[in-house]
Amino acid sequence: MKREKRAAISSKVEKILDMPVGVLSEIARIELSGNRQVLIEGCRGIVKYDEDQIQLRTVGGTVRFTGRELCMTSLNPACAVITGRLLSLEFL
């Protein structure tokens, strides 16, 4: 119940201040630049990593990226950056 209440308050504050959805709440933010790069905010760790598939644990669950020549060019507590030829994105 406490988590639901916090999410509801965050959602209201975002709306009142005209902020993008998810800035204050506990959800991952994913920004695609075509099919060549993706920025993931809210990354909590790597589940699987190879050249054809990268799975990341995020605040909202696990996300799987598939493609060719995938490479994680940055990973820090704030975000991760994946480059390569992205073919699909799945929420698991």
Image (tube, grey):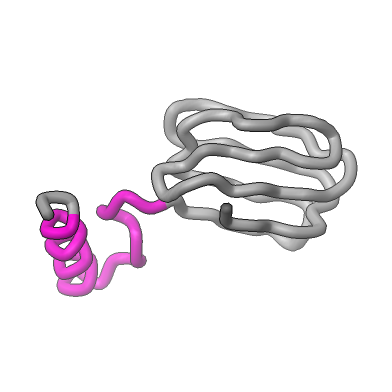
Q: Relative to residue 49, is residue 22 drawn left or right?
A: left
Identify whether 5 is placed above or below 83.
below
- Part of the protein shown in magenta: 4-27
Rendering coords of residue 32 (x, y %): 64, 58
Is 41 positioned to the left or the right of 11 in the image?
right
Residue 23 higher or lower than 55, as above or below: below
Above or below: residue 60 compared with residue 4: above
Viewer-nearest residue: 64 or 29: 64
Vertical placement of residue 7 versus 18, above or below:
above
User: Residue at 22% across / 73% down in the picture?
Assistant: 15
Magenta span contains residue 67: no
**Image position of 41 (left or right of 90):** left
Of the pair 32 and 68, the residue shown nearer to us: 68
**Residue drawn at x 52%, y 29% as measured from the top left:** 45
14 left or right, relative to 58: left
Question: Where's residue 9, x and y in %?
Answer: 12, 62
